[in-house]
Image: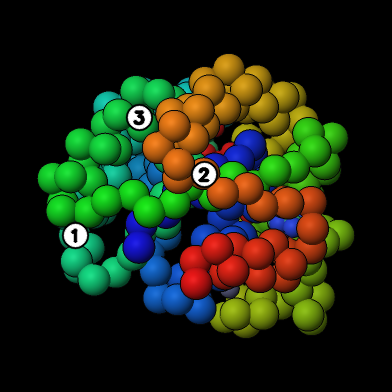
């Protein structure tokens, strides 16, 4: 099974992808995570992407599609892929079709997380992750069970993304509206789109997604 999780920044794509990884053994392919790793490692792609990401704009279609292609090439054929934050433009959607075909895969579903825009700034400015294992948390909606200690790995180091500030979030939301939302009709025509209420609790959203994948 290969699925796309689609939704604006802060919709809960990463949170739900992580649950699918834990519960179904699928693989999460997050272009945001791949780009942040490249920035951290100071690779040529990272050096190019950093300023664009800090502004909240989109990195080039070619760069992110190459990252996805490389990840799929390294994956074993039986593991399902969860595309998280990719595709984000009509051009990327076209490239994904080509890439999937070249790896003998097909797209099974596009799950759209529907959220109120007002909630997104709040979600994103409260977001933090474990610096060691990457587990996701929120200042109000998902605190670690023991304050200051990661539930998953016990680390006491956490981090926040430099682009998770209100100003950049506004740009990212505009980018989503202008470039990403318009790809939904492409998938609607192919009858692939399922909608989930992303304003429900994290557990409820997971249940709804599991229901769709049964
Ligand atoms: P995305 O990957 O779509 O940008 P995340 O999964 O990182 O979004 O979620 C953004 C923030 O909102 C995180 O801090 C996460 O813990 C929190 N969050 C995710 N889903 C929900 C939800 N259903 N209700 C409340 N908070 C949520
Ligand atoms: P979020 O889900 O919170 O919007 P991501 O982690 O998916 O954030 O992406 C962070 C940034 O990385 C984006 O604002 C953009 O600059 C870049 N990026 C990630 N995925 C893509 C993509 N598919 N196409 C272009 N740029 C991307
Ligand atoms: Zn951790």
Query: Are the residues flagged by discs 3 and 2 in contact, CB closer than 8 Å?
Result: no
Task: State how far apart marks 3 and 2 are (Cα).
Answer: 17 Å
Q: Position of residue 205 (x, y in %)?
A: 69, 62
Q: Position of residue 52 (x, y in %)?
A: 48, 23
Q: Residue 74 shows which numbered tag?
A: 1
Task: Give the mark, 3 or 2, whose residue is nearer the N terminus.
Answer: 3
Is the residue 84 above or below the residue 89 in the image? Answer: below
With 80 as the anchor, is 201 left or right in this view? right
Image quadrant for the N terminus?
bottom left
With 138 as the anchor, is 211 left or right in this view? left
Q: Residue 207 shows which numbered tag?
A: none
Q: Residue at position x 63%, y 48% from top?
A: 195
Report whether the residue tagged 3 is closer than 8 Å to ligand 2.
yes
Q: Position of residue 160 (x, y in %)?
A: 66, 50
Task: State how far apart marks 1 and 2 are (Cα).
Answer: 27 Å
Is the residue 28 above or below the residue 85 in the image? Answer: below
């Amino acid at each position: 099974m290969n699925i796309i999780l689609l939704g604006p920044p802060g919709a809960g794509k990463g949170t739900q992808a992580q649950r699918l990884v834990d519960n179904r053994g699928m693989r999460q392919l997050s272009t945001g995570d791949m780009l942040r790793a490249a920035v951290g490692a100071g690779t040529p792609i990272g050096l190019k992407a950093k300023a664009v990401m800090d502004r909240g704009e989109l990195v080039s279609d070619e760069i992110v599609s190459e990252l996805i292609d490389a990840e799929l090439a390294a994956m074993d054929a039986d593991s399902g892929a969860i595309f998280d934050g990719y595709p984000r433009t009509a051009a990327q959607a076209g490239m994904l079709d080509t890439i999937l075909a070249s790896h003998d895969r097909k797209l099974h579903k596009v799950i759209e997380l529907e959220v109120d825009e007002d909630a997104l700034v709040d979600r994103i400015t409260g977001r933090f992750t474990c610096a060691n294992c990457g587990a996701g948390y929120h200042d109000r909606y998902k605190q670690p069970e023991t304050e200051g200690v990661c539930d998953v790995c016990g680390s006491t180091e956490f981090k926040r993304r430099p682009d998770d500030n209100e100003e950049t979030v506004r740009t990212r939301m505009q980018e989503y509206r202008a470039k990403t939302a318009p790809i939904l009709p492409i998938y609607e025509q192919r009858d692939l789109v399922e909608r989930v209420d992303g304003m429900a609790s994290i557990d409820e959203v997971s249940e709804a997604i599991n229901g769709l994948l049964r």
